[in-house]
Amino acid sequence: MTEMEGGNVRTRRRPGDNVSLVTQRIRMTLAELTTFKTWFATTIGGGTGRFRMDVWTGAAFENKVCQFNLSNPIQYIYVTTNIVDVQMQLRVYGV
């Protein structure tokens, strides 16, 4: 991904990447959400870094390299005062 002067982000395909977009929703407590937001902002550079996680591929959960699709913003859906559904779209490599 390359940030452009106009504020948009350009993603270039690399040979052999085989990338799929996967939308998922994860239920978190407010404490977990705070940890997630800190990790997102610092550890993976505002969502630009790659990370590994278990992703549902249609038949099973598989551990894959992922990256947030930043053109589709993360949504926070408050279920109760302490529970939040976090909906995200991931670029999943090797699917």
Image (tube, helix red, strand yellow):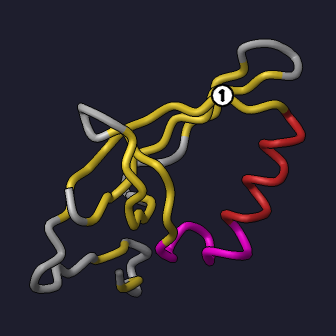
Specify whether 14 is left or right of 64: left
Image location (x, y in percent) of residue 55: 41, 46
Query: Does residue 35 show up magenta in the picture?
Result: no
Q: Which residues are magenta?
A: 41-50
Along the line of sight, the residue nearer the viewer: 66 or 12: 66
Q: Is residue 70 above or below residue 8?
A: above
Task: Name the residue located 27 percent from the left edge and 65 percent from the top edge.
Answer: 93
Task: Name the residue located 81 percent from the left edge and 42 percent from the top edge.
Answer: 32
Q: Is residue 83 above or below residue 22?
A: above
Image location (x, y in percent) of residue 43: 70, 76
Q: Quadrant of residue 81?
A: top right
Image location (x, y in percent) of residue 3: 41, 83
Task: Name the residue located 79 percent from the left edge and 22 percent from the top edge.
Answer: 83
Image location (x, y in percent) of residue 37: 74, 55
- Residue matched to label 1: 27
Q: Quadrant of residue 64?
A: bottom left
Question: Quarter of the image containing the N terminus?
Answer: bottom left
Specify whether 69 is left or right of 10: right
Q: Is residue 59 above or below residue 44?
A: above
Query: Does residue 48 show up magenta in the picture?
Result: yes
